[in-house]
Every structure is written in C-alpha cells, then in structure tokens.
Image (cartoon, rainbow, N blue to C red):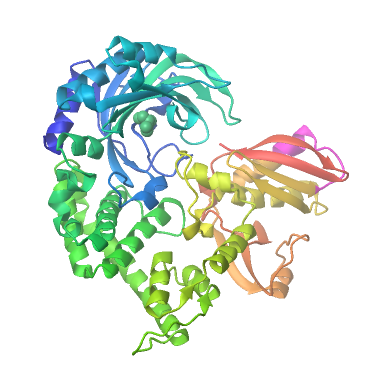
C-alpha cells in the first residue's frame, strides 16, 4: 500500500464515521507555549476545552509534526524529527468505546495477521488518576487476551498537556511487532499551570498514529527509511555502506524537516524554532561532509524532496525557490564559519603527515571554543581531533558547558524543556547554548525592574531573580507593601512598553563603560572586565548575559500574580506572561 493509499484509506475510514476532514495546520503553532506543532491535537486544543468547533465535533486529519526531542535518536529504525500524524478526534462526542473499536477495526483492515502481531497498553493508575479499567474491559471485549493488555504508568500511558496547560488524560497504545504505532488519548482532565488536574466537563478523544511507522508495517519494511516516503526522494542517501548509514538517514530526515519548516515560514536564527532549523541545516552539512556528499547534491535532493511532497502539500512547490535560496544562504554562512574555525584549528593543531604518533594531550578548552565561538557541532570536533591524533577531553568540555549553563541559570532548565514541546524532552547538553532558553520572561524581568524604579523610586534594587516556565520571580529592595494602585501602575507601564514594541539591543563593552552609561548591575554578581549590556530602547539598560526576546511585543501580556515580603526590606513579585 503506497503512502497515498494509506492517507486516503485513513481519511475515508473516519469520513464514513462522520468525521470532518481537516487539513494539517502549520508547523508554527498558534499556541505560543510550544515551539513547534508536535501533534495533531494542537490545532484543536480550544475545542477540547469547550469552544465550539467550526467543523462539528468529530475531526480527522494528517498533521505535519516536529519533535526536537527525538533528534538524537534519528538514524535508528523508527525515529524522526519531522513526521506526519494520522489522527481522529472527538470534542465532547464519542469516547473510549468507539475510539478503541474503530482503531482496532481500521488496523484489522489494513495490517496482515493483525491479531497475532498486536498488543496494547493501558494506564495502570496512580495517586491522582485511577486505573483505566474501562479501556481494559473494552480491549478484552474485542477479544484481546489479557496477557496482551499491559498496564503502564504515567510515563507511557498518560498524555499531555502540550505547553503550560491544557487537556490531557490517560491513553491506550497499540503496538505492532513491538513497535508503538497508535496512541489513543482520552482527554478527561484539564491540567492547570500549577499542575493540578481538574475533570473536564466535556470528554474528548485525541488519537495519533505515525504515518511513517504505519507505512513501514504495511509495506513490510524493516525501517521507516525503506518506505516509499523516503526511498523515492532519498535513494542515493539511503543505499550507503553500513558505516555511512546513520549519516545518510540523518540527512534525509533533516532535509524533510527543514523544507517543511522553511515552507511554513520558519527562518534560521539563534533562538527557538529558528535555532532548530539552523541546527538541522548545519547537521545536514556536517554529515554530508562526513560521507562525501557534495553540497550540490544536497541541493538536488532538497529539490527532489520538495517535488515528491508537493503532491500532498501544495505550498511546498510554491515555495520551492524560496526554500532553496534560504537553505543556500544558511549553508554559505555556516561554511564561512566552518572555514574560519578550521583555520584557527589548523593553526593550533597542524595536520602532521607521516606516521601516526599517539599524542597524549587531551583537548577540552579549545573544543569548547570551537563549539561556542564557531558553532562547530560536537561530532565534528571529535572527528577533527581524532584525525590529528589528539584526544577529546570530554570531562573538561562538559565542565565548561556546565559553567556556561550556570551563567544562565536564572532561566530554568524546566522552561527549556517545556518550550521545546512539552514532551518531557531530553535536554540536549551536547548543543547547549544560551539560544535554547525561554527568553520572554527574562526580558519581562528587565521591564519589571525598570517599571518598579520608575513608579516606586530608585531605592528599588534587584535582590534576586528566578524564572520557571510558569512565572518570573523578582526580589527587590523596598521597605513596605505595594498598594493596589502601585501594582496596577507597574503592570500598566510594563504592558505599555510591550505594546510599544521596543527593540531589545545587545552591546559589548567594558564593565566601567557599562556603569558609566547608566546600565544597572546586580550587586551580588561578580562581573568580568568585558560585559554585555541589554537595552530596551530608551527604557531599560542592564548588564546581563542574556538571552532576550528581540522585540518587546513578543512578550504578550504581563500580569502580577503576587506581591509579598521576601525578607526584611525585600519585597517579592511573581508575575506571568499570558
Ligand atoms: N496527542 C497524542 C500524541 O501525540 C495522540 O495524538 O501521541
């Protein structure tokens, strides 16, 4: 069965069950609490919460999805960054019985010997949510023997919410030949920002099945890269000697990911979605180098992939020229950096011809510089060192990365994970850099600091700051409780500055210069000679490592949640961006 046939079969199956066929939404979600669209349910989030859906209360879609969490696993049999997700949805309409029966019916229809190859999992229950007995009984009633209905915990069998808050619930997963292919989520709860579960008035169903994995099963392939979704456009990448296989697969996956991101309007930059795109493109170029694929061939492959997927996503064809141009621009930029970095590297570690001599010197600091200053991916650094017979000092490198991380620790690690998809994503320390952080609350902290000084007077000084995905917390010197009116004025001033859409600019200067220029410094911090100063156009100026939002309008709406005493003479404000 071709991928086109699978698409049609799935959509028609649910159309016959009165589902409206809804086109995929963009990879750039309207829900600003997630970085990229990671699942089919994302565009339907409001309808699970009771908002009236414009296409009735049953929907079916094939959604473009992107998961940064899987980037390190790409290259194995079944993981991808970009993939397409087949899903059916109920917004307060049918629930567990229909959802399970239909999934079972569909798979029986398309998977050979389904009964013997399948098993399922259901939620075993925990302190907050009971065992999903109902799903268990439904599977049993469909003739699935008990030993094939496994009970699993929260990690596997409770899904959501995406982002900071939203619908979520227990799920049941269907496996074929041990591979998870379909996840049926029963949205019974609303998870609030403070992680409380509240029963939803309206129950919903959100299912998701990876098209590539289903194609692998239906086309009887050993891995997703052998399916027609990859084989046709990327043949030349995938038929490689074994030691080049992983790189070939990574390039194929990343080409798909980057053309779809570019087509949906993502542009490479140093933060958020733009950084994800930049990273994909750089990895493509590095892996291409590694397996001797010239850059021209990469451009050909991008063109081929666009042509191939244009039969499903028309936008791609329209954007073809633009995608190729942006890709080329980014590649040129990276090549320049790479060249500069390589020159520097050559200077320090000249390539010695002749006999291989084992030099015991371990390289950590320089590896870190190459990574931070020139953006060299870690795998390339390791390879270069190996080529020149030096040892990579992993401990030293990690130590440096940790130090860098600590410099930015006011922006929480949890915030990063959340922002990157709400999937319990792994934190990618190999590629740790400040760009990864959730920056908006950080910029809001600067606005708040200045607003407080303006409304309450310059006795206000920063005493501490802490940011989690949910809120910022700011401690400052001030002798008494703020009045309601003062709080409102501070809020209004911050929101006014957000609406003015001010530029946030970074400058490098000496610490003395920074102080002379009136930039605020945090007295508890020890500053180096050379510092960065962030100014928010005419309003605030602080010595700070960043990173920050480029423009204040990106912040949304600022709200003070609480004002309280922190210690003698120190007040504490908690605030959020909505
Ligand atoms: N939202 C669930 C998932 O992404 C089911 O669609 O797995």
Q: Quadrant of the C terminus?
A: top right
Quadrant location of residue 213? top left
Q: Quadrant of the N terminus?
A: top left
Quadrant location of residue 192? top right
Q: Which residues are magenta?
A: 477-489
Residue 467 is a magenta residue: no
Query: Which quadrant of the render holds ligand 1?
Result: top left
Residue at position x 69%, y 70% from top?
A: 514
Residue at position x 51%, y 23% from top?
A: 190
| Residue situated in front as seen by the camera: 206 or 484 | 206
Q: Is residue 538 visible to the viewer in this orientation of the structure? A: no
Instruction: Give the side of residue 174 with respect to residue 124, left or right.
Output: left
Residue 484: x percent and y percent? Answer: 76, 33
Q: Is residue 131 visible to the viewer in this orientation of the structure? A: yes
| Residue situated in front as seen by the camera: 66 or 559 | 66
Q: Is residue 140 above or below residue 420?
A: above
Instruction: Give the side of residue 253 with respect to residue 416, left or right.
Output: left
Residue at position x 48%, y 17% from top?
A: 131
């Amino acid at each position: 069965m071709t991928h086109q046939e699978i698409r049609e079969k799935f959509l028609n199956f649910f159309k016959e069950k009165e589902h409206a066929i809804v086109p995929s939404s963009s990879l750039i979600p309207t829900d600003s609490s997630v970085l990229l669209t990671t699942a089919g349910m994302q565009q339907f989030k409001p309808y699970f919460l009771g908002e009236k859906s414009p296409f009735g209360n049953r929907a079916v879609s094939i959604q473009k999805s992107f998961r940064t969490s899987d980037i390190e696993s790409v290259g194995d049999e079944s993981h991808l960054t970009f993939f397409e997700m087949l899903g059916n949805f109920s917004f307060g309409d049918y629930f567990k019985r229909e959802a399970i029966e239909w999934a079972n019916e569909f798979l029986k229809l398309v998977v050979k010997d389904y009964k013997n190859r399948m098993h399922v999992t259901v939620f075993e229950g925990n302190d907050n949510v009971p065992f999903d007995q109902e799903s268990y009984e439904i599977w049993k009633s469909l003739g699935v023997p008990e030993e094939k209905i496994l009970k699993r915990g929260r990690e596997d069998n409770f899904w959501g919410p995406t982002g900071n808050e939203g619908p979520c619930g227990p799920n049941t997963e269907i496996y074929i030949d041990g591979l998870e292919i379909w996840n049926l989520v029963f949205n019974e709860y609303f998870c609030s920002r403070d992680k409380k579960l509240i029963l939803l008035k309206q129950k919903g169903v959100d299912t998701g099945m990876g098209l590539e994995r289903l194609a692998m099963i239906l086309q009887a392939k050993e891995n997703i890269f052998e399916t027609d979704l990859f084989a046709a456009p990327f043949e030349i990448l995938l038929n490689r000697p074994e030691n080049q296989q992983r790189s070939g697969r990574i390039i194929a996956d990343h080409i798909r990911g980057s053309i779809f991101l570019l087509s949906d309007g993502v542009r490479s930059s140093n933060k958020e979605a733009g950084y994800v795109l930049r990273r994909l493109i750089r990895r493509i170029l590095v892996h291409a180098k590694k397996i001797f694929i010239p850059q021209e061939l990469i451009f050909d492959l991008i063109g081929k992939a666009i042509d191939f997927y244009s039969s499903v996503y028309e936008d791609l064809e329209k954007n073809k020229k633009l995608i190729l141009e942006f890709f080329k621009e980014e590649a040129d930029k990276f090549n320049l950096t790479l060249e500069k970095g390589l020159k520097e590297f050559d200077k320090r570690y000249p390539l010695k011809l002749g006999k291989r001599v084992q030099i015991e010197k371990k390289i950590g600091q320089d590896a870190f510089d190459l990574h931070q200053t020139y953006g060299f991916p870690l795998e390339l650094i390791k390879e270069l060192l190996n080529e020149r017979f030096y040892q990579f000092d992993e401990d030293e490198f990690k130590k440096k990365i940790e130090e860098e991380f600590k410099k930015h620790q006011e922006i929480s690690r949890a915030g990063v994970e959340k922002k990157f998809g709400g999937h319990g994503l792994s934190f990618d320390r190999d590629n740790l850099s400040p760009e990864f952080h959730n920056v908006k609350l950080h910029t809001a902290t600067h606005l708040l600091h200045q607003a407080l000084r303006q409304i309450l007077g310059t006795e206000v000084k920063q005493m501490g700051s802490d940011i989690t995905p949910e809120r910022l917390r700011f401690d400052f010197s001030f002798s008494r409780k703020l009045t309601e009116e003062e709080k409102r004025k501070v809020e209004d001033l911050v929101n006014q500055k957000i609406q003015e859409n001010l530029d946030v600019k970074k400058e490098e200067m000496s610490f003395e210069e920074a102080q002379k220029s009136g930039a605020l410094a945090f007295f508890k911090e020890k500053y180096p000679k050379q510092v960065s100063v962030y100014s928010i156009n005419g309003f605030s100026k602080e010595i700070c490592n960043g990173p920050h939002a480029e423009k204040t309008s990106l912040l949304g709406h600022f709200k003070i949640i609480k004002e309280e005493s922190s210690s003698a003479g120190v007040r504490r404000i908690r605030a959020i961006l909505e």
